[in-house]
Amino acid sequence: MSGAVMQAGYAEDRAAIEDLMARYLFAMDWGDYEAYLDMFTEDGELEFVRGTAKGRQAISESVRAFKQSIGQFYKDADGNPAILRHIISQTVIRIEGDRAFAVAFWWEMANDGPGGKPKPGTFGTYEDELVKQDGRWLFSKRRILNEFLEGRGTGEVNPVRLLDERAQRARA
Amino acid sequence: MSDPAQLARDRAEIKDLMGRYLFAMDWHDTEAYAACFTEDGVLDYAMATLTGREEIRRGAEKFRDAVGDLFKREDGSPALLRHVLDHIVIRVEGDEAWTTAFWWEMTDGGPGRTPEIQSFGTYEDELVRVNGQWLFRRRKIYNELIPGRETPAENPVRHYDAAAQAAAKRN
C-alpha cells in the first residue's frame, strides 16, 4: 500500500518543513554554518559522500571540509571558484506525530558553463527524518544521495516506497 | 509566535502570488504583473528601480521589448524565456511577510532549439496584506550572472529574519 492518511495539521507541518528545507539550502550555499547546524537536532546525523557525521560538532567539521573541497572542483571560465547553487524541487513529506519522513529531489548548477553560463552539475535525492522539538521541526537525519557518485546513488527502488515503509514502522 | 494554521495559509497564498508573478512576466501580461505589487510598490532589478504600479507596468513593457534582443535562437528569432522558482523561505508577522527565494531561467535558444539555462539568482521580497490579499511592497532581484547584481555574501535569509523579528517586537 502506498499513499498517506494525512493527520490534521498536515499543511502546517508541511509548510514548516518546506521552509526548513529552503533555509538549509541558503545556509549551505552561502556558507552560514551556524544557521546550518541549528537545523539539526543535537545528536542529528548527516550521511553523505564523506561518510556519516553524528552530532552538531561532527557535522560542522565534515561540512566545512566538504565545502572547501567542492570549491576546488567547480571553477568558472577564469579558474575562480564558481558560484554553486543547490536547488530543491518536488518533496514528499510524511508526518507521524512529532516525527516526519521526507524524500526530496535536488540538483545543482554553477556558473561554470561555456562563456560563463550556468551549467547543471549533479542531481540526487535527500532522504530525511525529522523531529518536532519545542514546536520546531529539525533534521534528526539527512541522507544525501547523488546519482553521479559511485555507491551513493538512490538505487532502483522508488525512494518514496522506502519512506512509506519507514513511516509505517514509526507508526507501529 | 504565529499561529501555524495561519502560517500555512499565508505560505500557500504567497507561493501562489509568486507563481502568478512569473506567468505574468514570461507571458508579458504587464497589467497582471504590476497588479502583484502594492500601489506604491517598489521593484528593484537589473534595469532600474521602479516605484508604483504604473512605473512597474511600463518597466514590464520595456522588459518585453528588450528580451527578444537579449535572448535569441540559433536562427536569430526571439527565444522563449521561462523563469523557474524553487525553494522559498517565508517569514510572516501579522500582515507583513518577508521571503527569500531561489530563481533561475532558461530559454529555447540552445543548440538545435534545446533548453539552455541563462541565469540564476535570488528574490528578496517584502510583502504586505492589503484587503486580505498578499502583494509585493518591495521586490529586489539579484542575479549572480550580472556583475554588480549578485546576492550579497551573507546568507540572505538572515537579513529578513532580522526584519521579521523587529516587526514582531513592534506588533
Image: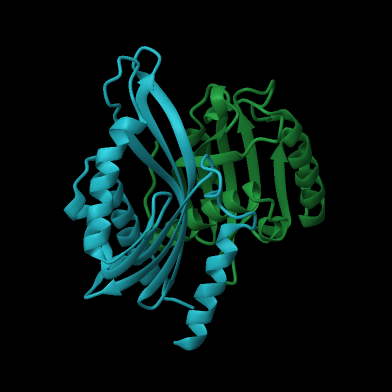
| Residue at (77% x, 36% y) in the render | A51
Q: Quadrant of the C terminus of chain B?
A: bottom left
Q: What is the x, y in percent for residue A3? A: 38, 41
- Which chain is in green here? A
| Residue B31, picture quadrant | bottom left
Q: Nearer the viewer, residue A66 or B126?
A: B126
Q: What is the x, y in percent for residue A89? A: 45, 40
Q: Nearer the viewer, residue A36 or A92?
A: A36
Q: Is residue B166 left or right of residue B14?
A: right
Give the colour in which the image draws chain B: cyan
Q: Is residue B131 above or below residue B67?
A: below
| Residue at (48% x, 80% y) in the render | B167
| Residue at (30% x, 14% y) in the render | B75
Q: Is residue A135 visible?
A: no
Q: Nearer the viewer, residue A64 or A160?
A: A64
Q: Is residue B108 visible?
A: yes
